[in-house]
Amino acid sequence: MGKGSGYGKVILFGEHFVVHGIPGIVSAIDSSTDAIVTKAVKGQNVKDERKTAKGYSEEKRLQQIESIERMLKAMDLDPRLPFDIWIGGTLPGFSGLGASAASSVAIARAISEELGLNLSNEKINSVAYEGEKAYAGNPSGIDNTAATYGGVMWFKKNPAGGQDLVERIKLKKPVEIVIGSTGKVANTKAMVEGVAERKKASPAKYNPLFKQAESLAVAGHKALEAGDLKKVGDLMNENHRILQEIGVSSKELDLLVDIARKQSAFGAKLTGGGGGGCMVALTPGKDLQGKVVSAFKGAGYEYIATKIGVVTY
Ligand code: PMV
């Protein structure tokens, strides 16, 4: 029996833009997906016991099968190698929190342990990136990097396919956030493809937005390291606006963002692929975090109250 885990994440700056080589900022959260893998006689039997948004497992089932095959290939193994795979853990299967990447990292680690492969974190990360392709089509790699290493990171994809730029960001101290879930399952692959198509069709509109996304990430990096959380919040609000402009927000995401801002969250934006899924509000201090939690509860939405900057290796 082999065991493994991978962390969930929130993207603070740059989702979607990061797929196209613009830098992004991600923080792991202290919820993980866990996997247990045991060699079997026949078939790949997946028992998925994660708490999920309604319809999440059904929507992702085929992608999950493809993902496991891709990962086995990336480990130079037979893609049909029979295994019993259990998936669970504290990270809910809500779209936008990197649940697919967390499960890929967890499964890759569990297979490595079960077969005694002793794979390094670097190898686990690259195997999980292969697995992510089944869910995201052309992923940036930001999710599997956060799921593998934890912490807060500056991430810039190398569009030529070489080494990505990954740097740790040190926060002065962990900061409270509230993640709000629309309860809607989103298809990351379709969202990523949609942005790429619209960008190609309307470069005059999209190119300046991509430039703005880059400036926001650079300014966000500085503000995070300086502990200027008001500034971080303002920049997150700006980031939400350009995500709306590239067509990845939704009515429910905008509503949750509004609710959080009305409670004086420092900033709020959708996080991850959008089109449903989750948003994140920056709520330094227990009191502010509690106010946003109560407002989400009152409006009937599920939430996770946690911190950025806690999981570091
Ligand atoms: O929705 P999630 O948790 O799969 O996050 C997707 C993040 C994107 O930037 C939209 C895609 C990517 O690969 O970076």
Image: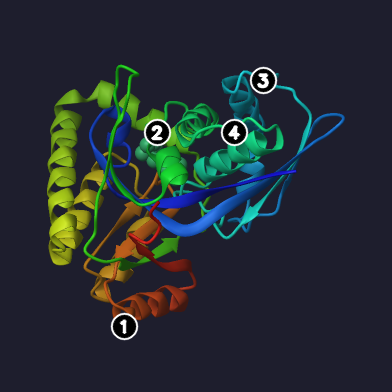
Q: Which secondary structure, mark 4?
A: loop
Q: Residues within 10 Å of mark 2 (few under 14, many from 20)?
A: many
Question: If you read the primary sequence from the N terminus, does the residue marked by circle 4 or circle 1 appear first?
Answer: 4
Q: Mark 3 belongs to which amino acid?
A: Leu
Q: Nearer the viewer, residue 276 or 266?
A: 266
Mark before the other along the chain sequence, 2 or 4: 4
Amino acid tagged 1: Asp
Could you say where residue 209 lies in the image, as x and y percent from the top left? 17, 37
Residue receiving disc 2: 141
Residue 217, quarter of picture: top left
Q: Is mark 2 within 8 Å of ligand 1?
A: yes
Q: Who comes first in sequence, dot 2 or dot 1?
A: 2
Task: Please give the name of the residue rendered at 26% of the width and 74% of the height, measured from the top-left corner.
Answer: 262
Q: Residues within 10 Å of mark 1 (few under 14, many from 20)?
A: few
Label 4 sits on residue? 118
Amino acid type, label 4: Asn
